[in-house]
Amino acid sequence: MDISVDYIFVRIKGNSIKIMGRQVLLFLLVLCLDTVFGQVSYAIPEEMEKGSLVGNVAQDLGIDLKRLKSGKSRIHSGGGAEYVEMNRERGALFIRERIDREMLCGETTPCALHLQMILENPMELFSITIDITDINDNAPSFASIEQHFEISESAVVGSKFVLETAVDTDIGENGLQSYSLKPTENFALKIENQVDGSKTVEMVLQKPLDREHQAQLSLLLTALDGGQPRMSGTMQIIVNVLDANDNAPVFTKSVYKATITENSPKGTSVITVSASDKDGGSNGEIIYMISNSKHRLSDVFQIDRQSGEVTLNGEIDYEKSKLYQIDIQAIDMGGLSDSSKILVDISDVNDNSPQLEILSHSDRILEDSIENTVIAMLSVNDPDSERNGEVKCVINDDIPFKIQNTRNRFYSLVTEGALDRESESQYNITVSCSDEGVPSLSSSVTLTLQISDVNDNAPVFERSSYEAYIVENNTPGLSVFTVKARDADWNQNARVSYILEDSSVNGVPVSSYVSVSADSGVIHAVRSFDYEQIKDFQFRVKAQDGGSPPLSSNVTVKILIQDQNDNPPQVLYPVQTGGSVVGEMVPRSADVGYLVSKVVAVDVDSGQNAWLSYKLQKVPDRALFEVGLQNGEIRTIRQVTDKDPVNQKLTVIVEDNGQPSRSATVIVNVAVADSFSEVLSEVPDFKHDKEYNDNLTFYLVLALAVVSFLFITCLVVIISVKIYRWRQSRILYHSGLPVIPYYPPRYSDTMGTGTLPHVYNYEVCRTTDSRKSDCKFGTAGSENMLIMDPRSSVTMQRIQSEKSILDELDSPLEVRFV
């Protein structure tokens, strides 16, 4: 838009340049303060139409239009009327409301709008200054249509009469410039410039009045401004000519000075003025009055017409006006007058609290934000003066934030130090601003800031290591115990998953022993454990959170297998076979305590489950023998008599100390005789037994051949199955899937060799009367094998073809002599 003016001034870095011309476009000045703030200035005339262009801010500040949109640019006017609005699409400022310079600034010059443009993400603040230039849109005007004077005809030439001044709200050349008075036969105008820039107009008598010639005069006072075109206002002056009053009132001072504090109540005395008149009678009576002026001071002050005391009639505010000039008159009854003025200084009182306004702020901030990250921008204003208007802002203590004064009356709230959501997830930041007045006034505003979580904490187990106990022969899938880890982070970053780390136990993946629930951390037994095969093992569990990238920690878990009384005692001596068992011989001359034999037994369990005790079953009243409770020694407890039978059968019970206890029995045949012939006489069927033994030998050889064939066949099958299972485990291992074998209850796996894994050889020596000096017997412990059918998931147990009599708890073994 073009602006029609005579000339304008553009100030650049302190220098004034005068630009002449009739048609002048808008002028702007862009000043870049630093990398954070920029400043641009425009000059526009008042009374521009709505929608008129002020300037292109984006172009002048070098800001991309996309940045205006993404930064949610907005104009901050400081709480006043919004005269200007911004179009984000074009990056330009337009007139929103008609601007009246006189209403906006009054007599203040220069008149400017101070705006701030705010961008977010990141926060930036730009200052925009719009100077409002005056146009000649107001004509000078008088408060009254006419003014009356009563002047004595004896008034001397040079007498002055104060006229009412005109008011022109325009400024500069467009303001009030001159007065004219017509006709000028008797009076002339005298104009004096005042300190505040106003003019005092007086009508000076330059030709004596003659009431008899003309009793009333009519004059026209015209006020002219300097605008183009020039505008004017008029007031009619009526002069009534009175009889002679040759002395005018005279004030004691030409200028009175007074001071009053703002916010003083109505009726407060400001000052008392006085004037004197040398005339007597009614011509010497003086009345006081306040001259009309453009400030309409009669609304603020009033003067007592008789005493001349000036009192406060309205409210005074230092922030609106710091100095008042009151023009007063003293008029006698003859119409003569004198003028003076009162300069009233207003003292400031600290009656305004600092005004805080949040320009922009963030609701959330990441806990790993760097230091000096801006979280809020504020503006502070205190309209008081001097120390009453000096403001200092602080924030509450013990928080990692600080407030910085970035520009005059603008503050930034920034981070100071590291943030930790786990220590404090929310901050209520109170910004308090107080002035330097006495007493000090303050105001505050509270901002709530949420701290967003960052995955900076790894899960932590409740213990540094874990130990758990499980009783052997457990059911597969049994819950052993639970590991627990906690993560101090929040939400997804605190969601903990549990993972079993890859390791092996005796060459077997640990995943075939235990499994871990990913969500709960519950550890389950995958197989049934046998204490006799494995007593303890350990592995590591990893706890991993759901952050990105994830954090983890691990812990060592040790599983201890507890023994169960699941194995009965096994008798090692006397040696038990499928045929006859040779007994022991006791001479009839044996003394009390004679050692007949010793029962040797073992229990593969541990602890008290392996403590064995020995006792005889069905002991008669006159028993000849007893067995040692702890050592299993069979001894005589009395002398042998002739009534004692030759052949005696002793049933020995071997019992462990488990709960419930398990036992085994063995029958020991004892011959009470001095010679072997005596024993044979008691065995009539000896020949028959020999024939029976020959037949038995044949069947034993046949059975041995069949068993050997079956053993070789089974050995080939077992080796084939093991090779197949090994290949299958390698395939599953490389696929990354857990292998969880199934074991039926009370079965052991193929990796073990039963409860008695070693081969024991025992040498048995008989009595001197035996047909052979000694005999060696060898027996192997039970040996269990697991054979897995690759076409099904069933695990079968194959028991060795030669079933050991030790597994039969209640079947006695009879020992006979051959």
Image (cartoon, helix red, strand yellow):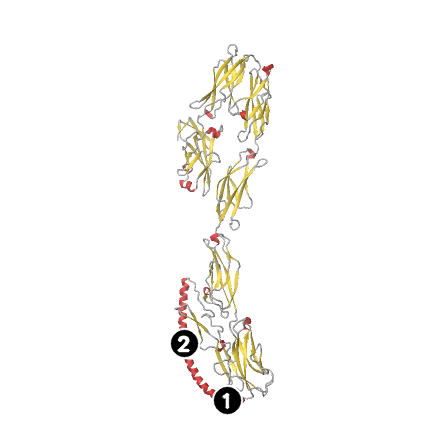
> Label for residue 464?
none
> Circle 2 sits on which residue?
712
From this view, report whether residue 657 is shown above or below residue 434. Answer: below
| Mark 1 vs 2, N-terminal side | 1
From this view, report whether residue 543 is shown above or below residue 419. Answer: below
From this view, report whether residue 633 is shown above or below residue 12. Answer: below
CA distance separating discs 1 and 2: 43 Å
Viewer can see residue 417: no
Depth order, front residue of 633/55: 633
Image coords of residue 226 (percent x, y): 45, 23
Image coords of residue 52 (percent x, y): 40, 32
Image coords of residue 759 (percent x, y): 48, 76
SS category of the residue bearing label 2: helix
Mark 1 residue crowding within 10 angstroms, few (<14) / some (14–19) / many (20+): few
SS category of the residue bearing label 1: loop
Q: What residue type is labelled 2?
A: Ile
> Circle 1 sits on which residue?
684
The N terminus sits in image quarter? top left
Q: Which amino acid does label 1 sit on?
A: Pro
